């Protein structure tokens, strides 16, 4: 569609003709998603839909660093609860504690961190109790 709209022709008519001719040439054949409904048509309108979708595809976040670390800490505790062994729990907690210590030494920009390193023994104790309650191996057995 490199042709310019000729003067004196209604724009809509000109555009419709361009689309019809392109369709006749088969230029719309084999487009991704052809024959399927448009995604998210039932969602409320969002001016930044394409930005959010791009960020999701790229794995980007727009949280300030302090809030991103808080979110990471929450996710890490959840991962520690799902761990298969005590050494894995300790490794997971040690990793996030290292990041928290670094952020406390040099606070990131944005809101206050409001986060302290996790007590590894307390997290391990919670992991054991949760596994015992489900009757899974790895928790301490009653004597």
Image: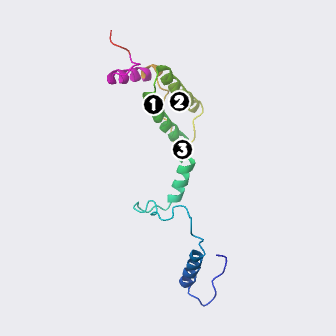
Which mark is in front, 2 or 3?
2
Q: Quadrant of the C terminus?
A: top left
Q: Position of residue 21 (x, y in %)?
A: 59, 79
Q: Based on the picture, tell me whether residue 133 belongs to the magenta stretch.
A: yes
Residue under the point 51% across and 61% down:
33
Q: Quadrant of the N terminus?
A: bottom right
Farthest-out residue, bottom: 8
Q: Position of residue 56 (x, y in %)?
A: 52, 50
Q: Is residue 106 above or below residue 111?
A: above
Foreground residue among 111 and 62: 62
Q: Are marks 2 and 3 in contact (CB under 8 Å)?
A: no
Which residue bears the numbered disc 3? 64
The reply, left or right, for residue 44 in relation to residue 1 is left
Spatial separation of the CA atoms under disc 2 and disc 3: 17 Å
Q: Is residue 47 above or below residue 97?
A: below
Which residue bears the numbered disc 2? 96
Which residue bears the numbered disc 1? 77
Q: Please, what secondary structure does the residue beneath circle 1 have?
A: helix
| Label 2 or label 3, whichever comes before in sequence order | 3
Foreground residue among 18 and 67: 18
């Amino acid at each position: 569609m490199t042709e310019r709209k000729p003067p004196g022709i209604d724009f809509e008519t000109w555009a419709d003709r361009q689309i019809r001719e392109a369709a006749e040439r088969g230029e719309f054949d084999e487009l991704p998603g052809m024959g399927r409904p448009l995604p998210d048509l039932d969602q409320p309108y969002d001016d930044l839909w394409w930005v959010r979708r791009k960020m999701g595809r790229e794995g980007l976040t727009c949280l300030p660093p302090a809030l991103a670390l808080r979110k990471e800490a929450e996710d890490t505790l959840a991962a520690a609860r799902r761990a298969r062994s005590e050494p894995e729990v300790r490794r997971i907690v040690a990793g996030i504690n290292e990041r928290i210590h670094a952020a406390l030494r040099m606070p990131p920009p944005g809101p206050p961190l409001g986060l302290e390193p996790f007590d590894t023994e307390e997290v391990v104790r919670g992991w054991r109790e949760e596994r015992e309650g489900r009757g899974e191996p790895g928790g301490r057995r009653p004597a």
